[in-house]
Amino acid sequence: MENGYADLHVHTRASDSTFSVEEVLDLAKSCGLKAVGITDHDTVEAIEPALAASVNYGVEVIPGVELSAEENNYDIHILGYFMDCKNPEFKQKLDELRASRLLRAKLILEKLSAVNVNLKLEDVLALTEANTSVGRLHIARAMKNAGFVNDIPDAFRRYIGQNGPAYVKKQFLSPKEASTLIKNAGGISVLAHPGVLNNYELVESVIKSGIMGIEVYHSEHSGSTVEKLKELTAKYNLFVTGGSDDHGAGKSKILLGSMLIPYSYVEKMKIYKEREREKTEKTEKPEKTGTGS
Ligand code: AMP
Ligand code: ZN
Ligand code: FE
Ligand code: FE
């Protein structure tokens, strides 16, 4: 009998979901989830509040993050789980990435205004939380609110998607930099939704750059993609994860709870973390040899 289920890919208002931490936990509880992974873009702002609130809902919060990396012009997302969110190097890099997101949002608005889509920065920022990670989804929502587009996909297709006139690249890490950042903060790096890349040569090259797991189960993965990815996890001895990639009501429909993985996959990551902790303790505190002192 399976010991509960988890959804390990969920966003909050700390990045580009419309859901607060409490709304995520409330919905996770009503879906009967044992654990939920909070994985905001370039920020861990929601982790502490979520850990504090989790006791009120009886749902375990798995600390996570979703970093954007780039290789060969592909936007490659890398999830991190169980990092020390207070790690100074990690925190500093996230601060930097968020600051560059704000600059990018300003540039996107300039490009939009050149094609007669005039939005105020404050109307975009009004859709975010303080110290948040502003992104294209916020801009797409502001465009919809102002009547420039009919829906979110329309905003990406006509304006801010990769081929749109107002597309601006993010400050990207390389996949190796992203996974190293996560590893150095004590976390487990996982390649997010690799099926979306639709390029298995690239997926294998990213795996070889130091990734420890694959998000095998994801809302946008077909059955055959899942099978292919499972084979890769076996070939490279990687962790298996999965999640819905819920963005509240902000992107499409609410997905939380629609993509569940057995909690035993979470346990595997926890066992690994525990072993790593024991190893570090041993090297930091070598056992006393019989010197009599
Ligand atoms: P950013 O991190 O600012 O580049 O924004 C990425 C966000 O936009 C993620 O939540 C993506 O899932 C979402 N996104 C990217 N392309 C599209 C699209 N064509 N339609 C809807 N959402 C998209
Ligand atoms: Zn997002
Ligand atoms: Fe993603
Ligand atoms: Fe995501």
Image (tube, grey):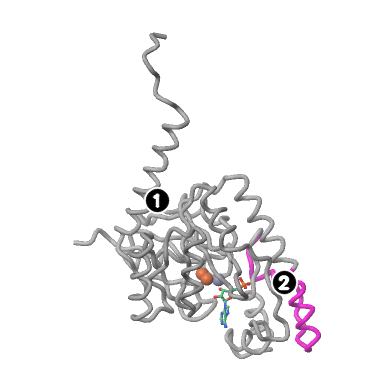
Which image quarter holds the C terminus?
A: top left
Residue placed at 40% from the left, 61% from the top?
A: 36
Residue type of the residue flagged with mark 1:
Val
Q: Write down the region rendered in magenta.
A: 104-130
Could you say which quadrant of the image residue 280 lies in? top left
- Relative horizontal placement of residue 140, taking residue 59 as reference (left or right): right
State the residue in front, 219 or 194.
194
Residue type of the residue flagged with mark 2:
Ala
Farthest-out residue, top: 292
State the residue in front, 128 or 155.
155
Give the foreground label among 1 and 2. 2
Give x and y (percent) for residue 235.
Answer: 35, 65
- Relative horizontal placement of residue 264, taking residue 156 as reference (left or right): left
Above or below, 284 relative to 47: above
Query: Which numbered tag is attached to residue 105?
Result: 2
Give x and y (percent) for residue 152.
Answer: 59, 84
- Relative horizontal placement of residue 160, taking residue 195 as reference (left or right): right
Determine the secondary structure under disc 1.
Answer: helix
Residue placed at 46% from the left, 73% from the top?
A: 194
Which image quarter holds the N terminus?
A: bottom left
Above or below, 86 relative to 28: above
| Residue 111: in magenta span | yes
Give x and y (percent) for residue 97.
Answer: 67, 60
Circle 2 Cα neighbour tier, 10 Å, few/some/many (<14 / 14–19 / ≥20): many
Circle 1 Cα neighbour tier, 10 Å, few/some/many (<14 / 14–19 / ≥20): few
Residue placed at 33% from the left, 64% from the top?
A: 234
Ligand 1 closer than 8 Å to label 2 CB: no
Could you say which quadrant of the image residue 286 lies in? top left
Mark earlier in primary sequence (1, 2): 1
| Residue 117: in magenta span | yes
State the residue in front, 56 or 280.
280
Q: According to the image, label 1 marks what residue?
A: 55
